[in-house]
Image (tube, rainbow, N blue to C red):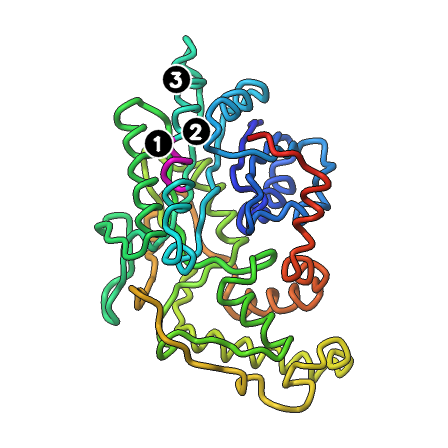
Amino acid sequence: MSNLLITGGAGFIGVNLVKWWLENHTADNIVVLDALTYAGNATSLEDVLGHANLNFIHGDIKDTPLVESLLRDHDIDLIIHLAAESHVDRSIEGPDEFIDTNVIGTHSLLKAARTVWCESGTWRKHRFHHVSTDEVYGSLGEDDPPFCEMTPYAPNSPYSASKAASDHLVRAYHHTFGMEVTTTNCSNNYGPYQFPEKLIPLILTNILRGKELPIYGDGMNVRDWLHVSDHCRGIAMAVAHGRVGETYCIGGRNEAPNLDIVNELCHQVEERFEKNPRLKDSFPHCPAGRGEKNTSLITYVTDRPGHDRRYAIDPTKASKEIGYEPLMTFVSGISETVDWYLGNQSWVERVMDGSYRTWIENNYQDRS
């Protein structure tokens, strides 16, 4: 049995990890710490907030005394650190928040963990697991081999630079202070509960509302797509079987250009409208409801600054050392994702109109 702290547990990956962990590690106790910024949505956890093994704390990872008290009061022996600002476009518009949360926030956590675990007079068994991104490795050429754990860091955006800095801090706390850490660098996640600023939920939401589908540049930027359920499994495997101080790359083995993803989403929605004509009543602005092609909404926009051309991950080390393999094919994963968004429009509406913020304000007081 573990007592674990999941930071950023109300974000996209965090919500999925909390629910996965409660289902697969029924004896463990979970404390979720989330500042509930714009992408932190506690309503995504509504169905589990009353679970006996879950405590939700509205607070900031930069509040070091708060983190120390949580580690002591709940006898935490495992931290899974997911809290981060993560949208490249936002990091270009305002880098400060990314440095503040991703660098200063990670250091705050590390300081608190070191104080409680390593300087309390008795060295206790622990693990600090840090979740990072493939973007710290920069951009690949068309024929380059995928990123692996030995790929040199070459971040190209304020977001990826801030994550690279946090990776280095975690490594330094292991080598300098002996903290027991592991790190995973994942590829692009997709699946349920993803905030609709990221490509897949944005495109799905715009298709259903008949809005433009913005494609950067020529649409041929390639990403390695990882279903969030496979990512949750990869994190758990790294925690359970990963060697202390090691990094593991968690990928989906699903490289595809952004334009192909958009075309596939257009096609998937059209198939569902054909099978269920009543969808046109729920989504009257969707082209498929009028017998038109959803691809008519595609609009090419000016490429963003420093847009990395290609990401891909080689998960060979994770496969050999911790037994990780992605189970979800992109065909099954994207189909499941489309069905989830169609079946959870109330969640989408609350995110789109901002009403989830009112729910948060009425239910939680900030502990920061």
- Whole-percent x, y for residue 227 in the image: 51, 58
Q: CA distance from mark 2 to mark 1?
A: 8 Å
Numbered disc in front, either 1 or 3 = 3
Q: Is residue 222 above or below residue 297?
A: above
Q: Crowding at label 1, few (<14), some or many (≥20) Cα neighbours within 10 Å?
A: some
Residue that carries the numbered disc 3 in the rendered image: 118
The quadrant of the picture occupied by the C terminus is top right
Instruction: Specify the amino acid type for callout 3.
Output: Cys
- Whole-percent x, y for residue 207 in the image: 59, 77
Q: Residue at x 58, y 27 (%)?
A: 1
Magenta residues, as a range?
102-107
Instruction: Specify the amino acid type for callout 1.
Output: Val
**65 inside magenta stretch:** no
- Whole-percent x, y for residue 308 in the image: 31, 64
Residue that carries the numbered disc 2 in the rendered image: 127
Residue 166 visible: yes
Residue that lies at the very extreme toward the bottom in this rendered image: 291
Q: SS class of the residue under badge 3? A: helix
Q: CA distance from mark 2 to mark 3?
A: 11 Å
Q: SS class of the residue under badge 2? A: strand
Q: SS class of the residue under badge 1? A: loop
- Whole-percent x, y for residue 159 in the image: 36, 52
Q: Main secondary structure of the magenta part?
A: helix
Residue that carries the numbered disc 1 in the rendered image: 244
Q: Crowding at label 3, few (<14), some or many (≥20) Cα neighbours within 10 Å?
A: some
For residue 123, which numbered disc appears in the image?
Answer: none
Count the marks: how many? 3
Numbered disc in front, either 2 or 1 = 2
